[in-house]
Amino acid sequence: MTNKVLPPDLIDEKSDNQEGLMTWAGHLTELRGRILKALFFFVLVFIVLYPFSGKILEILMLPLAQAMQKAGGSHRMIFTGVAEGFVTHLKLSAFGAAVLSFPFLAFQIWRFVVPALYENERRFVRPLFIASPILFVLGAFFVFFALMPVAFRFLLSFQQLATSDKVLPVVLEARLSEYLSFLMTLILAFGISFQLPVVLVILGKLGVITARNLKDFRRYAIVFIFIAAAVLTPPDVISQLALAVPLIFLYESAVWCIQSLEKKDDQGYK
């Protein structure tokens, strides 16, 4: 039985296909390794934080406790499930691990994409990877120190619904799981919302949008921002403005950044 001799062009094509497959396999292997490192770091931080979950709970309860000191009320929080206390400690540890693992996850993403970037692209992307965790933390701090005191001051004004002596009193007994879900959802929502300029700048660099597009879309963007603020925040005007105003500022900062990049590109072509 004779061996078939392939033409040189087919041999080259076959070699290129094998090299391409090996390249993709190498990328997938590296991506899997980066994901596993991020998961391992998350689990490690989770284990380290679990003994301190009570301290995390105390910190997260500060806004409501301070608001109750001023507005009055039961000055306590309840849970109704037998396993709710244990599950709460798990949730608090996972929440803390997710927040602290975010910079490490961003670093792993950076290490995965940086070999495929040119030097000028690295100079562009590097500040974004640094800015993203910072903006996330700023969003979380904004919720904790600016939004929550105002929101709880408003919400606690409804902690007693029935005031007549002829009927049974209807008063607030804050439930632990609902409070933590409410607060942690707001922190994550604001942290993600504060990524708006990063996303817009990347889209601008890719040529998907321009500064002129954002300027023309500004009025609609403001409407969408206020709608998002109404959905994400408690139902009072002050809380909605507390989210809408920073997002509008971040939107305008993205317009300025994209405009600066466009000017640099124009000067580079000249």
Image (cartoon, rainbow, N blue to C red):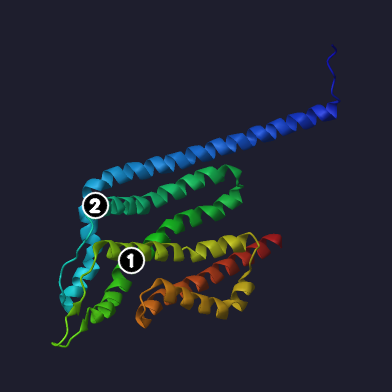
Disc 1 element: helix
Kind of residue at badge 1: Phe
Q: Residue under label 1, please give it.
A: 182
Residue type pointed to by label 2: Ala
Return the residue nearer the eye: 186 or 113: 186
**Where is residue 234 drawn, in percent x and y?**
35, 75
Residue positioned 35% across, 68% down in the render: 142
Residue 154 can be seen, yes or no: yes
| Residue 161 placement (x, y as % from top left) | 23, 82
Tell me, for residue 39, which label it has, or none: none
Q: Residues within 10 Å of mark 2 (few under 14, many from 20)?
A: few
* 237 relative to 82, above or below: below
Q: Residue 239 occupies which quadrant of the picture? A: bottom left
User: Helix or strand or loop: what does disc 2 sit on?
Assistant: loop
247 lies left or right of 70: right
Residue 194 seen by the camera: no
The residue wearing badge 2 is: 83
Q: Is residue 97 above or below residue 169?
A: above
Residue at the top extreme of this rendering: 1
Nearer mark to the viewer, of 2 and 1:
2
Q: Say if mark 2 contacts mark 1, CB within 8 Å.
A: no
- Quick one: label 1, few (<14), some, or many (20+) residues within 10 Å? some
Direction from residue 165 to residue 8 in the image, left or right: right
